[in-house]
C-alpha cells in the first residue's frame, strides 16, 4: 500500500511548485511505486467546509510536505492561515514533516510568514545543535520522537564510563606507614631503610610498599634515572610530608593493626638496656662475716677481759 504525501502551501503563490512536486514524485520510478500525492486543488467540489477537508487529509497522510514562500495566505477569524493550520495539525498528530522554504530574503515575506519560518528553522537548528553538543561531550546521541501529539526529546547524562573514574581514598598499610615514618626525619637508602624497619633483607611486602608509595607520589628517588644505583636514597615528597604531618607520627594508621604498627615503628630505634649499660652480671648481696665487723666498743671488751682474769686468780 502506498503512503500518502500531503503538500501544503499557499496555492496562489506556489501553484507551479505544487504541480511540479507532484509530477516529480509520481513520475519517478521508485518514489511513484511507494508514494501518492494529495493536492487540495485536485479535490472535486463537495458540500463540505474547506478547512474540514484539508485537515482531514492531513490526518490521513503519512508525510507532511510544506512549501513556504512570501505570502501567508487567507486568515480565518483567529488570524491563522490554512498553511499554518495544516502544519500545526501535522505536528500535533506526530506526522513526519518535510519543510522547504523558498528564497533567502526574509524582508519580502509577510510578517506572519516570517514568524512561522523562523519558528520552524529554530526548531530544526536546535536539534542539530543538541546533536553536535552531545557528540562534542562524548555523550550518547539524543533521541527524538512524537507521542500523542507531543514532541519528546531525550538527553542522556554522563555515566561512570564516560566520566573521570572515581578513586577511593587510599589508606597506608602498616608497612607503608613504617616507611613513611622512617623517611620523615632523613632520606634513607635501601639498606638503611631495611635496618630501620628491622628487616634483615628485602621482602616482597617491602618491595610492594616502595613501588606503591612511589606510584602514589608520597616518596621519590634521589636518583630517579638510576633506580638500582647503590647510592639511591628515598625521601618524602611534599605530598607525603603533608600526609605524615596531618596524620601525626604518633597516631599511626587506623584499624586493629595500629598498636602493632606503632610498636614495630619504634622498636628498631630503641636501644636495648644491654646496649645502653653493657652486659649485666648476676648480683648477690654479700653479708659481712663476724670477724670483718668493726669493733664499735673496744673499751667494753677490755673491761670484760680484766674481770675474767681477776676471777681466775681468786680460785
Image (cartoon, rainbow, N blue to C red):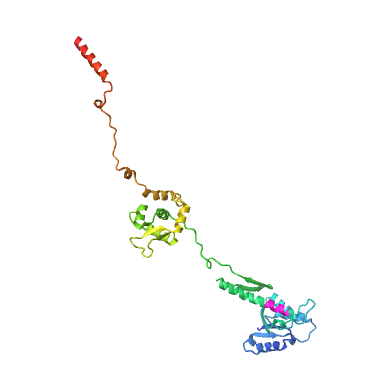
Quarter of the image with the N terminus in it: bottom right
Residue at image coords 25%, 16%? 303
Residue at image coords 66%, 75%? 123
Name the foreground residue: 297 vs 95: 297
Q: Is residue 213 above or below residue 279?
A: below
Q: Is residue 203 above or below residue 44?
A: above
Where's residue 126, x and y in %? 64, 74
Residue 223 occupies quadrant: bottom left
Quarter of the image with the C terminus in it: top left
Please give left or right for residue 304 compared with residue 69 in the image.
Answer: left
Residue 119: say if magenta: yes
Residue 293 occupies quadrant: top left
Residue 41: say if magenta: no
Where's residue 239, x and y in %? 46, 58
Where's residue 234, x and y in %? 39, 58
Which residue range is magenta in the image? 112-120
Please indicate, yes or no, whether residue 59 appears anywhere in the rendered image.
no
Amino acid at each position: 500500500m502506498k503512503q500518502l504525501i500531503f503538500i501544503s502551501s499557499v496555492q496562489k503563490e506556489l501553484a507551479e511548485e505544487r504541480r511540479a512536486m507532484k509530477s516529480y514524485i509520481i513520475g519517478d520510478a521508485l518514489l511513484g511505486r511507494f508514494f501518492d500525492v494529495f493536492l487540495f486543488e485536485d479535490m472535486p467540489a463537495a458540500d463540505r467546509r474547506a478547512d474540514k477537508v484539508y485537515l482531514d487529509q492531513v490526518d490521513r497522510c503519512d508525510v507532511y510536505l510544506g512549501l513556504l514562500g512570501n505570502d501567508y495566505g487567507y486568515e480565518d477569524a483567529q488570524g491563522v492561515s490554512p498553511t499554518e493550520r495544516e502544519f500545526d495539525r501535522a505536528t500535533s498528530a506526530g506526522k513526519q514533516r518535510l519543510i522547504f522554504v523558498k528564497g533567502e530574503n526574509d524582508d519580502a515575506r509577510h510578517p506572519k510568514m516570517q514568524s512561522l519560518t523562523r519558528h520552524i528553522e529554530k526548531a530544526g537548528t536546535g536539534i542539530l545543535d543538541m546533536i553536535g553538543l552531545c557528540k562534542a561531550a562524548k555523550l550518547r546521541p539524543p533521541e527524538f520522537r512524537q507521542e500523542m501529539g507531543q514532541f519528546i526529546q531525550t538527553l542522556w547524562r554522563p555515566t561512570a564510563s564516560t566520566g573521570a573514574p572515581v578513586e577511593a581514598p587510599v589508606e597506608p598499610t602498616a608497612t607503608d606507614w613504617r616507611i613513611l615514618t622512617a623517611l620523615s626525619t632523613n632520606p634513607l637508602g635501601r639498606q638503611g631503610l631495611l635496618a630501620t624497619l628491622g628487616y634483615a633483607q628485602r621482602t616482597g611486602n617491602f618491595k610492594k610498599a616502595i613501588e606503591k608509595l612511589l606510584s602514589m607520589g608520597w616518596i621519590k628517588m634521589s636518583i630517579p634515572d638510576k633506580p638500582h644505583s647503590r647510592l639511591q636514597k628515598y625521601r618524602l615528597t611534599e605530598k607525603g610530608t603533608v600526609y605524615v604531618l596531618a596524620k601525626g607520627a604518633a597516631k599511626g594508621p587506623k584499624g586493629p593493626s595500629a598498636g602493632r604498627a606503632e610498636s614495630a615503628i619504634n622498636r628498631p630505634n630503641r636501644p636495648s638496656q644491654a646496649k645502653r649499660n653493657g652486659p649485666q652480671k648476676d648480683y648477690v648481696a654479700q653479708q659481712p662475716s663476724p670477724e670483718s665487723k668493726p669493733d664499735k666498743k673496744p673499751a667494753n671488751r677490755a673491761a670484760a677481759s680484766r674481770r675474767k682474769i681477776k676471777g681466775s686468780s681468786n680460785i
